[in-house]
Amino acid sequence: MMKKEYDFSKGERGKFYTPDAKFVFPVYLEPDVDDYINQLATKKGLDVQTLVNEWLRANIKLYTSVSADQ
């Protein structure tokens, strides 16, 4: 239960602020995709993040090459 008032008189403004912090949003995969990616990453000896980034970069390159032609 929340109190009616809180005492912030000893609080420190900006204590946890980091100007160069970057927000990384989570990506939620469907279970079948997650299973496949995890199996493939294990088979290739890569972590999932590396594998997914490689796939996305390849798709970005393909997309930009195809859309540049149009």
Image (tube, helix red, strand yellow):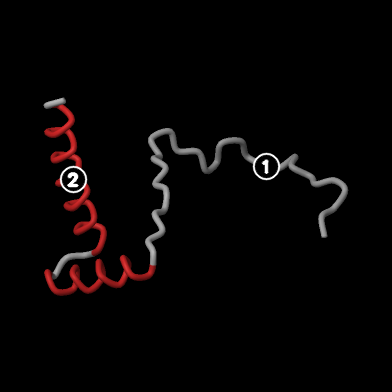
Q: In which quarter of the image is the N terminus?
A: bottom right
Q: Nearer the viewer, mark 1 or mark 2?
A: 2
Q: Mark 1 sits on what residue? A: 11
User: Residue 40: image x %, image y %?
Assistant: 18, 70
Quarter of the image containing the C terminus? top left
Crowd class of label 2 (few under 14; some 14 to 19; many from 20; radius 10 Å):
few
CA gap, disc 1 and disc 2: 47 Å
Q: Do the residues labelled 1 and 2 touch (CB within 8 Å)?
A: no
* Circle 2 SS class: helix
The residue where tag 2 is placed is: 59
Residue nearest the observer in this picture, 35 or 22: 35
Look at label 2 and name its amino acid. Asn
Quadrant in which residue 66 is drawn:
top left
Q: Which residue is drawn at 39% across and 46% down?
A: 24
Name the residue furthest front.
Answer: 70
Image position, residue 37 (x, y; %): 25, 66
Q: Where is residue 44 in the image (x, y as percent from the top left)?
A: 12, 69
Position above or below: 23 against 65: below
Residue 42 vs residue 14, the one in the foreground: 42
Give the amino acid at mark 1. Answer: Gly
Q: Earlier in the sequence, mark 1 or mark 2?
A: 1
Position of residue 15 in the picture relative to residue 32 (left or right): right
Q: Is residue 17 left or right of residue 9?
A: left
